[in-house]
Image (cartoon, grey):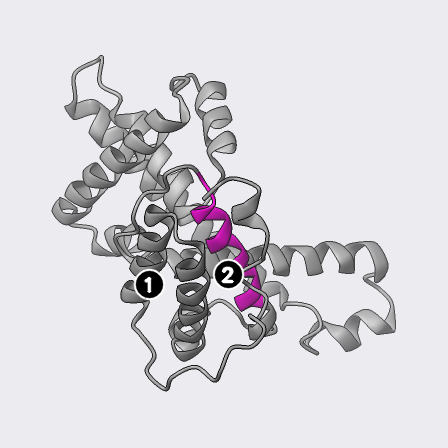
Amino acid sequence: MNNAASRSRNPLDPRPGTSCPPPHVPDLDTAVSAVHRAVRDGDRAAFERRFTRLDRSLRAHRGQIFCNASGLDLDELRQKVLIRVNAYFEQPEPESVRNARGWLRTMAANAAIDEHRSRARFRARHVAEDSPAAAHTEQSGVFPRADFLVELDQEARARDAAIRHYADAAAAAAPPTSRARAQIWTCYWLRICADTSAEVAERLRQQDLGEPSEQTLWQWASRGQRLLEQLCAADTDRDRAERVLERLC
């Protein structure tokens, strides 16, 4: 799946000569699992067909997936999510996705945050704060509301604090040689924040949490997910637990 021939055609582009899709729309877990099976089998044609079905599923469930898309073009955001999904499955031996809805919602939320931040940077560069244009466009939908960006930032900070709490708790309960703290942070950065393997490896190195190979990185993420699920299940602070569980794929 990773040779030059396998990338000869972008699955986001419509396939020439195809007929109208059938009316049945698979649920997200089924659609993502089907794409993964095609990758595992090395069947590029099946991958492209199933990717198209996944696109239809995203359209059908867009109200649930793109919940952080206030003021954004949903079609454009959906394309950005599909690009991220395609990049995930272009990795060598990508792991199966356990919760497609949460996984896709995380990708959509990250894409929306990136777009909102890009617009905010554009506004800072090109619109003077005291100009009449700034007041006119502030609530026009061209730029995100300032309070919406604050809400996104507060939610991200709260999620970081929750992961820090669980990482500390896991480390305190484990032997000194345990990698529990590193595993939880790896799961968070790799599966919740959807950072790349290279970015996660660099963060771990900078924070003196280890220098794992890419294969070990995914093993740590799997173990970190199991730890997080156990810690969240036992946590009496349900808001904190749900904040993590709703993004955990």
Q: CA distance from mark 1 to mark 2?
A: 14 Å
Q: Nearer the viewer, residue 172 or 62?
A: 62
Q: Amino acid at mark 2?
A: Leu
Please tell me whether residue 13 belongs to the stretch shown in magenta: no
Q: Answer left or right for 53 relative to 27.
A: right
- What kind of element bears circle 1? helix
Q: Quadrant of residue 215?
A: top left
Q: At x 46% / y 56%, what residue is drawn?
A: 107
**Mark 1, residue position:** 101
Q: At x 27% / y 29%, what residue is drawn?
A: 168
Name above or below for residue 111 compared with residue 27.
above
Please tell me whether residue 85 belongs to the stretch shown in magenta: yes
**Mark 2, residue position:** 82
What are the residue bounds of the magenta stretch? 77-91
Q: Quadrant of residue 101?
A: bottom left
Name above or below for residue 146 compared with residue 248.
below
Q: At x 45% / y 50%, what residue is drawn?
A: 156
